Amino acid sequence: MPTDDSGLPAESWRWTEQTWRGHVDALRAGRRLVPDRWPGDARVAVALSFDSDHETIPLRDGETSPGRLAQGEYGARVGAARILDLLARHRVPATFFMPAVSALIHPEEARAYTADGHELAVHGWIHERNTLLGRDDEKELTARALDTLETLTGRRPVGIRTPSWDFSDSTLDIMLELGFAYDSSLMADDEPYEIVATGRPTGLVEIPVDWIRDDAPYFTMDRYGSVRPHSRPRDVLEIWADEFDAAYRDGGVFQLTLHPHVIGHRSRLVALSGLLDHIAAHPGVWFATHAQLADSARAVLAGPTTSRSVPHAPEHTP
């Protein structure tokens, strides 16, 4: 971040074009990776994900009170089992992004995900804020998380979702160095795309997220803060159903991010079950893990440029 003579951040209106353009071009969305048809000749791809954070969010912040830890424990003790049962009844695969510390606290849960045919992917070590870490610490924690999940389940994860839903200056290079096939942390599109760094295609598939398609903004609660649940589960069901319907019309992707300690409560699972019923009523739906979706997107990347891609404006030349 540029600074002025006092050492404080400089006002952005003082930045040179080289400065603000450098920030914008550092990490961009490249080619949209949507095939003409999804596997099985499906019209739409549906990728459900669950961030099994459990106790790691309070632990990350040094909050060790039984009340805060119990709120996270609910996700492991109650929510995860309900979710696995719901997915089994609907015969839907999903991706579980799990901090390594959460997996170490609940190893049988981590193994249950893969045993049931779901994907287990990296979500940091202790849900750390990766954007506040130096390169060495961020790489060490990411690598440790990757190795831990592989040791627990016997399968090496291929995907990552950063705990911050953001990148530091080092995050992309770390992902590429550690061999991840895809990321699911950024928000530049509704559909998968290739990440481009300073004008250079990286080959890394991005499966974008968004707060609209996340349960936490609608349902989280902070007793001592201003965050309060303000949405009826059925209202959220309507929002997500509308999101799916639009993806279905577009022939694109409906991606959803949920949390066992949030969505795992009874009334909220009723809404999630209703959403799955709504989706299943449509012909031509491909339910996929994020890894399977990334594989399909990568096939577009490797093939001829005849997919449904978004035209990009020409690069700026000073």
Image (cartoon, rainbow, N blue to C red):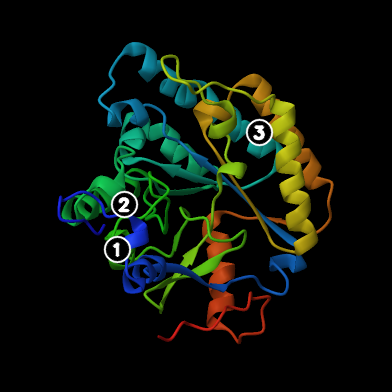
The answer to whether one can see residue 43 in this image is no
The residue indicated by pointer 1 is 178
Whole-percent x and y of residue 53? 41, 34
Whole-percent x and y of residue 104? 31, 34
Name the secondary structure under disc 2.
helix
Going 30% across and 35% down the picture, which residue do you hit? 101
214 relative to 72, above or below: below
* Amino acid under disc 3: Leu
Q: Earlier in the sequence, mark 2 or mark 1?
A: 2
The residue indicated by pointer 2 is 146
Q: Nearer the viewer, residue 298 or 225?
A: 225
| Mark 2 surroundings: few (<14), some (14-19) or many (≥20) residues within 10 A | many
Q: CA distance from mark 2 to mark 3?
A: 27 Å
Is there a contact, CB below 8 Å, between mark 2 and mark 1?
A: yes
Q: Quadrant of the N terminus?
A: bottom left
The residue indicated by pointer 3 is 86
The answer to whether one can see residue 123 in this image is yes
Q: CA distance from mark 1 to mark 3?
A: 33 Å
State the image quarter where residue 212 is shown. Answer: top right
